Image: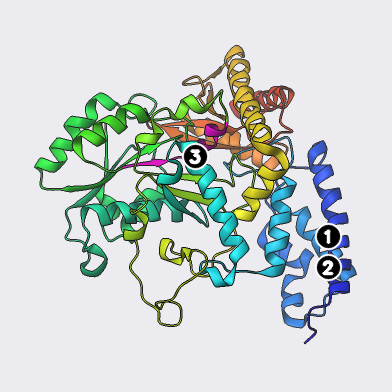
Amino acid sequence: MRDWSFSEFEEAVVEALRVLDAYVEQSREGGDLVVRLTPVAEIFGETEIEDWIANGSMTTSSFAAFLENYLYHSTRMFHPGYMSHQVAVPDFPAALGDLVHGTIHNPMAIYEMGPSAAALELAVLRWMLNKIGWGENGSGVLTHGGSLANLTALLAARAAVAPDSWEKGTNGNLVILAPPSCHYSVARAASILGLGANAVLPVEVDQNEVIVPSAMSATIKHTMEEGKKIVALVANACATGTGLHDPLKELGRVCHDENVWLHVDGAHGASALVSEKEKHLLRGVERADSITWDAHKMLRTSGLCTGVLFNDPHSLEKAFKQDASYIFYEHETPGVDLIHRTVECTKAGLGLKVFLNLAWRGETGIARYVEEEYSLARRAFQVIQSRDRFSCPYVPESNIVCFRYDGDDELQVLIRERLLAEGKFYISSTEICGRRYLRLTIINPLTTEDTIQELLKAIERIAATIDQ
């Protein structure tokens, strides 16, 4: 088998950059489709995946041809019509981080396997903790995604209320309080933790599924009177479906008074903390016990990269109890072993991507991006509300906009499916209190108000054909 050849690597990288540059520029111009839902069998045939797996022998030129076919069937995140999911259009410094990690491959959960990566992670965590208001007093770790981060936070919360559960398991009376709008990973975490998805109990919300803080104290007391132990109250900042924020300041006060762990799922919205203009949306976040913060959303890193952060520096230490003689033994280390804080063992150097985006763009550059996307979402709301047969259920707080075209829930689904089939615009949908809405995530710097206008015209055209 051929060993590493830098000359071959360099040639392949040059070819990759050539193909990727054309792909990104074509995407940014909006000339091609944003999404192609090509059947898997056709992709297999056009990219010759199975032949390459069976036979190998790829060269620089054949790699370039393969990459062009691969990218042809890829969803174009840089396309102005990409307004669907909460996934970053990555900035190029983060892509450099992926290239470096893919080359050096330092799985840095133990310090000796990646001192530089560990140092960068600690620096990024310190920056995040400072933005929350916890500074040197907090702790945290970077994980591969928000689902793992929520699981980690709830592990720590479980350890606080049931400290022997790691060894003995749970006794069936542990519950999590959360609004219906919480991310599905909360119920998934409950099942993994042995509580069961049914242990996630709903709390009172308003017409937009935002927690009603005045009802929380009574809900907590009633839950406890039933003999249940509350692992945590999960609050949104912001909710995945709606982009709305739960009132953290008021919830923090209630949880403090009732001695209940407050976990904030800030996967999407925590990046507003970088902006002086928008950080008010997370007012009171410093009262929380834990928070998740995805860098692969509004910090514009590639996936996956999430901070799970704790107010009490000892909380994370209690979440995991593990033993492996080939890794753990009593010894002095010049750095920090992060493996005691995380599910992952072979963990990527995730901090590099965040660091490079910060180093290249600075806080001011990232703040400007957040503010521009939030501002465009508010303008989109005004444009949508001004058109006949369109309506929005609320004024957007973040860069997520929900709206309906006049008609039933089935019409909203059909409109989205037609848009996907045409491939010029890629949007999502969600339910709010049982009603189906179309949904925009304004996350692409190339999306403009003109893009929104063209989307609405396409919806009107599609709806007219459905009405007929």
Quarter assignment of residue 148: bottom left
Residue labelled with disc 3: 130
Is 50 above or below relative to 100?
below
Using residue 84 as the reference point, say whether residue 145 is left or right of it. Answer: left
Q: CA distance from mark 1 to mark 3?
A: 38 Å
| Disc nearer the start of the sequence (1/3) | 1
Task: Report crowding for label 1: few under 14, some 14 to 19, many 20 or more residues within 10 A (C-alpha).
Answer: some
Residue labelled with disc 2: 63
Q: CA distance from mark 2 to mark 3?
A: 44 Å
Residue labelled with disc 1: 16
Q: Amino acid at mark 2?
A: Phe
Q: Nearer the viewer, residue 144 or 307?
A: 307
Q: Secondary structure at mark 2?
A: helix
Using residue 352 as the reference point, say whether residue 403 is left or right of it. Answer: left
Q: Nearer the viewer, mark 2 or mark 1?
A: 1
| Disc nearer the start of the sequence (2/1) | 1
Is 362 above or below relative to 304?
above
Name the residue at 21% across, 63% down. Answer: 164
Q: Amino acid at mark 3?
A: Asn
Residue 316: numbered disc: none
Name the residue at 73% across, 49% down. Answer: 93
Task: Report crowding for label 3: few under 14, some 14 to 19, many 20 or more residues within 10 A (C-alpha).
Answer: some
Q: Position of residue 207 (x, y in %)?
A: 36, 24
| Disc nearer the start of the sequence (2/3) | 2
Q: How many marks?
A: 3
Q: CA distance from mark 2 to mark 1?
A: 8 Å
User: Which contiguous range is marked in magenta?
Assistant: 262-274
Q: Secondary structure at mark 3?
A: helix
Q: Nearer the viewer, residue 12 or 254?
A: 254
Task: Report crowding for label 2: few under 14, some 14 to 19, many 20 or more residues within 10 A (C-alpha).
Answer: some
Contact (CB < 8 A) between labels 2 and 1? yes
Using residue 102 as the reference point, say whether residue 386 is left or right of it. Answer: left
